[in-house]
Image: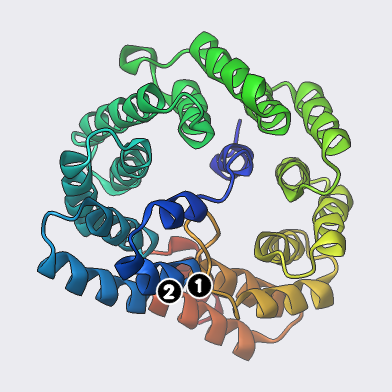
């Protein structure tokens, strides 16, 4: 079966950074808040945008930036409120609908069985609107690929529609297109095809970390541990501070029991970062580090890491179960 982690890794890998567009459109008065947001100082950024939005209730940019900040902090209710306001104030703004769609989708993950379909329909409608307003919104198209692959037929799920979006992505960005087609191949359990698409993307853009991260996630899912390590280490070789690669090296070590010293080193470095929206939360890094310590026989350190994980995310079931096994 396709793991959620690999599916998401492949889809996320197709996305380019989304901060620059917002910064370019912002007014000078919002620049300090944008700098805080880009630096991932989310608490400070949220405080800045909250004050600005209160003083300027009709400013669509402030509402948009505040909504994004709340989303990055996983405050989905507030993110929805502000991004809905932003799209109402600026209904021709594609990126507003893109981030609103992601907010609905994230909310759906935590919603009841009865609420999920409605939220996902709203997400789909917002992604469609983003693409209608900006045909070059590759981020929205990549999310639609994942939606069409995961949604049941009665909600519009369709492999053919996923392929249509992948074709549109490939027309505009060969690497992102290869990643989109790899997502589809993985969904169809075509492991050889997935690997070929990702290797093709690496040949096209050897300096681009996205295909290697996706390839590493594929190997990780297939428990090809050495190949997974090699893919993630290749990213680090080109970009030593790539947080996603650091985390994945640590996760691979935690899952496999191999290269534990290296896994510990990478997870400790990752814990010094402020992860972005698409990067694993710090709670997950504490969880993986706890597993590494447990595999190395250090139960005291493992317990401390599991407790740190639960402090950050009390709903992290894996950490709670791991902690229980130590008691």
Going 18% across and 55% down the picture, which residue do you hit?
Answer: 59
Going 16% across and 47% down the picture, which residue do you hit?
Answer: 85
Label 1 residue SS:
loop
Q: Which quarter of the figure is the N terminus placed in?
A: top right
For label 2, the residue is: 36
For label 1, the residue is: 39
- Which quadrant of the view contains residue 241? bottom right
Q: Can residue 75 be seen in this view?
A: no
Query: Looking at the picture, does residue 189 appear above or below residue 79?
Result: above
- Left or right of residue 106, residue 211 in this image: right
Going 85% across and 69% down the picture, which residue do you hit?
Answer: 259
Crowd class of label 2 (few under 14; some 14 to 19; many from 20; radius 10 Å) = some
In terms of depth relative to the viewer, which is nearer, 268 or 235? 235
> How far, Cα to Cα, is label 1 from label 2?
5 Å
Q: Position of residue 42 (x, y in %)?
A: 39, 72
Q: Where is residue 134 in the image (x, y as percent from the top left)?
A: 42, 28
- Which quadrant of the view contains residue 192? top right
- Left or right of residue 302, residue 314 in this image: left
Q: Can residue 225 be seen in this view?
A: yes
Q: Residue furthest top?
A: 160
- Left or right of residue 95, residue 221 in this image: right
């Amino acid at each position: 079966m396709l793991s959620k982690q690999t599916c998401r890794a492949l889809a996320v890998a197709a996305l380019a950074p989304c901060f620059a567009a917002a910064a370019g459109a912002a007014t000078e008065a919002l620049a300090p808040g944008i700098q805080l947001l880009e630096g991932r100082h989310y608490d400070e950024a949220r405080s800045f945008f909250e004050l600005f939005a209160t003083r300027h209730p009709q400013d669509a940019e402030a509402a948009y930036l505040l909504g994004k900040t709340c989303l990055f902090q996983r405050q989905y209710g507030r993110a929805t409120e502000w991004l809905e306001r932003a799209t109402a104030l600026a209904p021709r703004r594609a990126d507003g609908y893109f981030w609103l769609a992601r907010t609905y989708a994230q909310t759906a993950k935590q919603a009841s069985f009865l609420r999920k379909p409605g939220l996902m329909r709203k997400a789909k409608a917002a992604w469609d609107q983003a693409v209608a307003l900006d045909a070059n919104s590759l981020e929205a198209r990549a999310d639609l690929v994942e939606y069409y692959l995961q949604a049941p037929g009665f909600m519009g799920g369709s492999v053919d529609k996923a392929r249509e979006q992948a074709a549109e992505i490939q027309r505009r960005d060969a690497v992102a297109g290869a990643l989109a087609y790899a997502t589809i191949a993985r969904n169809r359990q075509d492991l050889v095809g997935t690997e070929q698409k990702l290797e093709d993307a690496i040949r096209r853009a050897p300096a681009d970390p996205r295909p290697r991260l996706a390839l590493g996630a594929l190997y990780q899912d297939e428990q090809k541990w050495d190949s997974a390590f090699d893919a993630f280490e290749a990213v680090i070789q080109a970009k030593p501070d790539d947080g996603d690669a650091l985390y994945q090296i640590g996760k691979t070590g935690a899952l496999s029991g191999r290269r534990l010293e290296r896994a510990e080193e990478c997870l400790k470095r990752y814990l010094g970062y402020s992860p972005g929206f698409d990067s694993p939360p710090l709670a997950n890094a504490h969880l993986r580090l706890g597993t590494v310590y447990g595999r190395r026989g250090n139960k005291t350190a493992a317990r401390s890491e599991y407790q740190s994980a639960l402090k950050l995310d009390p709903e992290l079931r894996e950490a709670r179960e791991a902690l229980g096994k130590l008691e």
